């Protein structure tokens, strides 16, 4: 996999409202790759540089 360009790979931070867990997801084209799993009902996503 070629993951060099920011257009292909966008790192986002997901903030779990339940326990305030941070788990990063990699956005490649249409696929969401979960790095750190966090099982919650609702998740708020913010920019990687925000929090």
Image: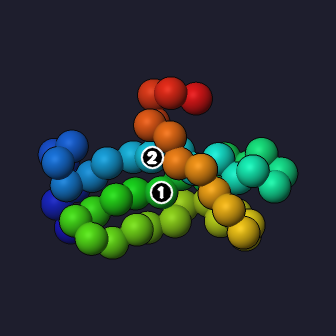
Question: Which residue is the site of mark 1?
Answer: 25
Q: Quadrant of residue 1?
A: bottom left
Residue 40 is labelled as none
The secondary structure type at the circle numbered 2 is: strand
If the image is split into quadrants, where does the C terminus sit?
top right
**Residue 41 image point, x, y percent:** 72, 69
The secondary structure type at the circle numbered 1 is: strand
- What residue lies at 31% left-to-right and 48% top-to-bottom? 10
**Residue 39 image point, x, y percent:** 72, 69
Marks 2,1: beta carbons within 8 A: yes
**Residue 8 image point, x, y percent:** 19, 55
> Marks 2/1: CA distance?
6 Å
**Residue 17 image point, x, y percent:** 75, 50
- What residue lies at 63% left-to-right and 57% top-to-bottom? 43
Instruction: Decide: is 7 above or below 36.
Output: above
Horizontally, residue 27 falls left or right of residue 13, namely: left
Horizontally, residue 43 falls left or right of residue 5, namely: right
- What residue lies at 34% left-to-right and 59% top-to-bottom? 27
- What residue lies at 22% left-to-right and 65% top-to-bottom? 29
Question: Which residue is the site of mark 2?
Answer: 12
Q: Quadrant of residue 36?
A: bottom right
């Amino acid at each position: 996999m070629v993951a060099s360009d920011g257009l292909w790979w966008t790192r986002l931070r997901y903030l779990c409202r339940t326990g305030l867990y941070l788990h990063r997801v990699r956005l490649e084209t249409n696929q969401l790759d979960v790095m750190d799993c966090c099982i919650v009902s609702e998740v708020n996503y913010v920019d990687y540089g925000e929090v």
